[in-house]
Image (tube, rainbow, N blue to C red):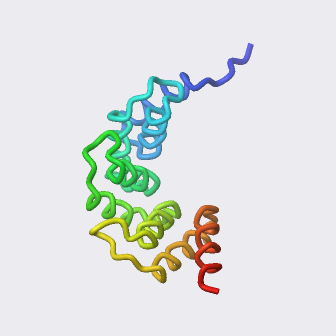
Amino acid sequence: EEQRPSHKNAIEWFKRAAAKKHPVALFYLAEAYDAGNGIEQDKLRAFDFYLASAELGFAPAMNNLAAYYWSGTGVEKNEKQAISWYIEAAENGEPAALYNLGKRKEKGDSKYVAKSIQEAMDYYTKASIMGHQGAKRALMKLLKKRR
């Protein structure tokens, strides 16, 4: 009889690959801890796995790590670190990071990012081209305001 894959089985495979410092496995393990999916939710462990994956160059992990720093989830809030990781993720082609930088530029809600609607639109445009739906909506909203 064929056994159906489960979250628990997936977690075990991710743990094995993460032990070998596989950045994607570290990321998926972080996501599982983040959401409590197949494993008990643990934001501190999620942070650690996002950090390990990000340090190995995985851009989606860089973006999520930045979000943790921005909100103070699993770590002390640190806007400077957040912006640094968002920039690193964006430079590594992560559309969600481009979107998040666009939000920071649009809102001007950090002493580390000057408000600039034009730069926000530039970030949203780049993320939109990469298929990020939230960026498309944000860009359309800003374009309507300009009329």
Residue 100 x %, y %: 46, 63
Hey, which residue is sitting farthest right in the picture? Answer: 1
Q: Is residue 14 above or below residue 85?
A: above
Residue 7 x %, y %: 57, 26
Q: Is residue 102 above or below residue 53?
A: below
Q: Is residue 108 above or below residue 89?
A: below
Residue 137 x %, y %: 64, 67
Q: How many numbered marks have been drawn onto this rendered protein structure? A: 0
User: For this rendering, which residue is in front, 12 or 130?
Assistant: 130
Q: On the picture, is 42 further left or further right than 141?
A: left
Hey, which residue is sitting farthest top in the picture? Answer: 1
Q: Which residue appears at 43% of the width and 69% of the height? A: 107
Q: On the picture, is 49 further left or further right than 78?
A: right
Q: Which residue appears at 36% of the width and 64% of the height? A: 88
Residue 67 x %, y %: 40, 52
Quadrant for the C terminus, please: bottom right
Quadrant for the N terminus, please: top right
Q: Which residue appears at 26% of the width and 54% of the height? A: 78
Q: Quadrant of residue 135?
A: bottom right
Q: Which residue appears at 42% of the width and 50% of the height? A: 64
Q: Is residue 54 above or below residue 128?
A: above
User: For this rendering, which residue is in front, 78 or 24?
Assistant: 78
Q: On the picture, is 75 further left or further right than 62?
A: left
User: For this rendering, which residue is in front, 124 or 95?
Assistant: 124
Q: Quadrant of residue 90?
A: bottom left
